[in-house]
Image: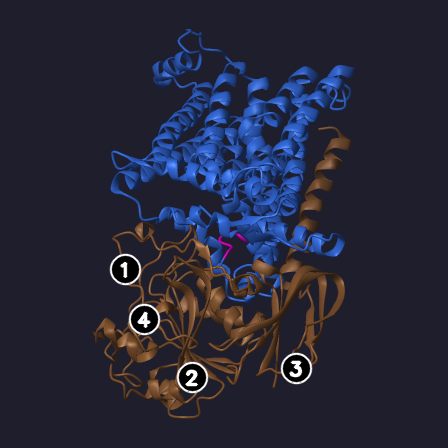
């Protein structure tokens, strides 16, 4: 190839090298910076070093104190009940460990970094202490015998009733007790009523191949939460039918098949249980992180919401705060359905 | 070196009217399709990859990226440029009206649809790469044959190739980048740029793994080109140094944050998919055949005399890439060898043209069938041209089952069978022209007969 063309090829090779180096910087070089701020008057500011959509939502959480400490249960010695799920070619298998690792990374960038993994023993200690402002995540499909024995006297139920929040995903809540030998005991699906007050969970037989499971909600629950929080998971297996609960004791959001809701917060004494429908999925995990980061509860109401765009700048605005309100939270996040940053602000 | 390579006749220059016409037609088709049709499943992942990096989780900290790092870096370089210079703030939206498509239970059907602007941002760089590859093929043919008309034909074969147009203009797959990098490494080695050639080869291999199989041909070429093991050792070491440094630069961050293992999950994921027994057997049969061809090509090439080794370098690269591109079933994988096949057709064997067309069109049909009516999601969601329920109904129709198979599956199997046969024959036809051994003469004759669609051809001395 002539000298000019040879030079072009060399330049092309160097251009490829430059693109790769820019890409590496963008990926690993802390290239992006975000910030957000809000005050009790509803004033907010959101900053991005790039260009992003943002959502700022003002919630009234009634008398409930938002979860500020989160404990993620994981104990490899205790039994669990986890259904195999289909993943895309090349994707890692969606195991409990993998899910929890993803959950932690996701919570961090949404501004909720006060989380910790706990085993069955540590969980026992947690549920024997103060419950207010604390949350426990269980995705094992079974609750360890250190805190639950299938009866109404179980420590975890008392803890929830005293103000704690249990986030549950995978399986019918309360059906299985996990034992330290790695086994589980089936105490019956009716035990869901210990947590939810009623038998209201969606049960479906698991088919031979995960792809054969027809578990989809085709409608959006039209109360604003799905849009304002960019909720994604439309699966409703194991989800809650809130029509079987007393009015005013629950909040559903996300998607519905007409009966079950992909996300439901259910009052339990002074605390609450939050059930996310579906087997493991990335969308479910992202939804869980959004609702934890936003500090939601069964009493939450959207007071105001603003969305917009911020481009290498700071955008300011104001959310309307009514005269009378309960505990307030402002949750701001960037990126919409492709969230990249979040932060919440709590006010009384 | 051909004198005419410097300045072909006016009509056959790259900026001559014929080439510009080809360029204009190819660009027009791509830019027309790009904002109209998109495959949500793939492009939403490109958005996720950028999102994960923007959230501070690197390439592998959050689920969404399963390849070796290069494509992730390229995407994020684009993302960085977009963040620095544009106002592209929204990647995509989850449309409630399209949820029914997910209810069909195929992981490839998604109600999350990326925006037209984001889609264009992903596709335009690929269109540019298509053009660069076309130019490289043009220059290679011009230099080696001195014939500007042939050079333009090779450019046209590549640039107007249906599956190439589809992959950059519609599906936004990055196989053209892999093809470009493989070509650049080949050219650099031909020009004795050992270090840079080795580095670009490694980048190519870490973009999609198909070019990695060129390693055997490259090693033999470097050594023979430089007069044997003794005198070839230093150029070889330069190439190795380039490859190693490129590897370290690319992989260092993933090693440091402990996520490097995730970068191989796509390769091993394909190999270990839960498939029915027949599919697994066919998969391994295919793999064994391809490995046999790749190693056989290296063996044949190693036995060539040094002057023939230089002359046949491109042909053995083509044979190797033809086998590599066959290893995994997927309509886009043929793109890695199509540039060299275009070169080969105009430089050596015009009779391969129909086979090029068969591969190109079966690749296109396979992609269309695979992507199916989800291609209409963007037009439905953002332009309102098609009712979302229509998209769902059409996709549901193709999911109807006949004798236990979906309608779509029938079409895919039929099309991919033809494509696979064409790709296997492509390998066979090339081999028949490269292997002059006496004992294979009957097989060669049969292959030539097939290549000519039943017309007999005498063995050439080429």
**Which mark is first along the chain, 2 or 1?**
1
Point out which mark residue A204 bears. Answer: 1
Q: Quadrant of residue B12?
A: top right
Q: Quadrant of residue B127?
A: top right
Point out which mark residue A271 bears. Answer: 2
Please report the bounds of the magenta region as a residue range: B64-69
**With A235 as the anchor, is A79 left or right in this view?**
left
Count residues near mark 3 (Cα–Cα under 10 Å), then give few for <14, some for 14-19, many for 20+: few
Count residues near mark 1 (Cα–Cα under 10 Å), then give few for <14, some for 14-19, many for 20+: some
Disc 3 secondary structure class:
loop
Q: Which chain is brown?
A: A
Count residues near mark 4 (Cα–Cα under 10 Å), then give few for <14, some for 14-19, many for 20+: many
Instruction: Measure the alpha-carbon separation of dots 2 and 4.
Output: 21 Å
* Image position of B233 with respect to A109: above or below: above
B68 is within the stretch colored magenta? yes
Give the mark toward the camera: 4 or 1: 1
Image point (36%, 14%), residue name: B446
Q: Quadrant of the N terminus of chain B?
A: top right
**Which mark is first along the chain, 4 or 3?**
4
User: Which residue is identified by label 4?
Assistant: A141
Give the mark toward the camera: 3 or 1: 3
**Which mark is first along the chain, 1 or 3?**
1
* Image position of A321 with respect to A163: above or below: above
**Which mark is first along the chain, 1 or 4?**
4
User: Which residue is identified by label 3?
Assistant: A323
Instruction: Measure the alpha-carbon separation of dots 4 and 1.
Output: 15 Å
Q: Which chain is blue?
A: B
């Amino acid at each position: 190839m002539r000298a000019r063309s040879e030079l072009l090829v060399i330049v092309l090779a160097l251009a490829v090298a430059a693109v790769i180096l820019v890409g590496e910087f963008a990926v690993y070089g802390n290239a992006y910076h975000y910030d957000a701020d809000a005050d009790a008057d509803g004033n907010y500011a959101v900053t991005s070093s790039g260009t992003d959509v943002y959502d700022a939502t003002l919630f009234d959480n009634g008398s409930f104190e938002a979860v500020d400490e989160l404990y993620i249960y994981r104990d490899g010695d205790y039994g669990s009940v986890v259904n195999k799920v289909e993943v895309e070619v090349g994707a890692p298998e969606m195991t409990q460990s993998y899910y929890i690792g993803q959950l932690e990374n996701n919570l961090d960038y949404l501004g909720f970094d006060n989380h910790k993994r706990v085993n069955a023993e540590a969980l026992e200690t947690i549920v024997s202490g103060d419950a207010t402002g604390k949350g426990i995540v269980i995705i094992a499909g079974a609750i360890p015998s250190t805190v639950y024995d299938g009866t109404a006297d179980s420590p975890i139920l008392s803890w929830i009733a005293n103000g704690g929040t249990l986030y549950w995903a995978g399986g019918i809540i309360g059906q299985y007790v996990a034992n330290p030998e790695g086994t589980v005991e089936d105490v019956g699906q009716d035990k869901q009523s210990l947590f939810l007050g009623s038998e209201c969970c969606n049960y479906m037989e698991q088919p031979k191949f995960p792809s054969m499971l027809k578990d989809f909600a085709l409608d959006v629950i039209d109360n604003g939460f799905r849009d304002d929080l960019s909720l994604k998971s439309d699966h409703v297996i194991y989800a809650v039918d809130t029509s079987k609960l007393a009015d005013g004791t629950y909040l559903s959001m996300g998607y519905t098949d007409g009966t079950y809701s992909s996300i439901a917060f259910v009052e339990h004494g002074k605390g609450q249980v939050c059930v996310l429908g579906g087997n493991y999925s990335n969308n479910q995990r992202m939804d869980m992180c959004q609702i934890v980061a936003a500090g939601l509860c069964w009493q939450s109401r959207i007071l105001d919401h603003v969305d917009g765009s911020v481009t290498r700048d700071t955008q300011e605005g104001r959310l309307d705060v009514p005269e009378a309100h309960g505990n307030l939270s402002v949750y701001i996040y960037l990126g919409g359905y492709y969230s990249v940053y979040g932060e919440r602000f709590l006010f009384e | 070196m051909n004198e005419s390579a410097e300045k072909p006749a006016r009509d056959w220059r790259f900026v001559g009217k014929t080439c510009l016409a080809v360029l204009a037609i190819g660009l027009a088709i791509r830019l027309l399709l790009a904002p109209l049709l998109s495959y949500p499943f793939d492009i939403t992942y490109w958005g996720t990859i950028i999102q994960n990096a923007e959230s501070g989780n690197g390439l592998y900290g959050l689920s969404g990226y399963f390849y070796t790092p290069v494509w992730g870096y390229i995407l994020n370089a684009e993302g960085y440029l977009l963040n620095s210079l544009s106002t592209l703030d929204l990647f995509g939206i989850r449309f409630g009206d399209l949820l029914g498509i997910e209810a069909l239970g195929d992981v490839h059907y998604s109600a999350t649809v990326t925006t037209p602007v984001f889609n264009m941002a992903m596709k335009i760089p690929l269109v540019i790469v298509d053009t660069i590859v076309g130019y490289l093929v043009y220059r290679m043919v011009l230099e080696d044959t001195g014939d500007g008309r042939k050079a333009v034909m090779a450019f046209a074969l590549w640039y107007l190739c249906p599956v190439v147009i589809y992959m950059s203009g519609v599906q936004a797959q990055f196989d053209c980048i892999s093809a470009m990098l493989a070509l650049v490494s080949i050219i650099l080695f031909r020009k004795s740029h050992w270090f840079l050639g080795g580095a670009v080869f490694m980048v190519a291999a870490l973009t999609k793994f198909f070019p990695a199989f060129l390693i055997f041909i490259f090693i033999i070429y470097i050594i023979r080109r430089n007069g044997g093991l003794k005198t070839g050792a230093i150029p070889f070491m330069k190439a190795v140094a380039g490859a190693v440094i490129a590897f370290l630069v690319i992989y260092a961050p993933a090693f440091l944050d402990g996520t490097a293992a995730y970068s191989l999950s796509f390769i091993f994921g394909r190999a270990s998919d839960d498939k029915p027994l027949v599919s697994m057997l066919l998969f391994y049969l295919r793999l064994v055949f391809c490995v046999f061809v790749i190693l056989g090509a290296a063996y044949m090439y190693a036995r060539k005399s040094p002057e023939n080794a230089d002359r046949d370098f491109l042909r053995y690269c083509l044979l190797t890439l033809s086998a590599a591109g066959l290893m995994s079933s997927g309509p886009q994988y043929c793109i890695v060898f199509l540039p060299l096949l275009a070169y080969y057709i105009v430089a050596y064997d015009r009779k391969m043209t129909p086979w090029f067309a068969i591969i190109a069109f079966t690749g296109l049909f396979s992609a269309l069938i695979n992507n199916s009516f989800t291609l209409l999601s963007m037009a439905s969601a953002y332009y309102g041209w098609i009712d979302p329920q229509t998209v769902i109904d059409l996709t549901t129709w193709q999911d109807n089952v006949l004798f236990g198979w979906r309608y779509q599956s029938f079409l895919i199997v039929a099309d991919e069978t033809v494509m696979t046969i064409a790709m296997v024959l492509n390998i066979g036809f090339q081999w028949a022209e490269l292997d002059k051994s006496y004992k294979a003469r009957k097989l060669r004759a049969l292959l030539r007969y097939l290549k000519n669609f039943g017309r007999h051809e005498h063995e050439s001395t080429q």
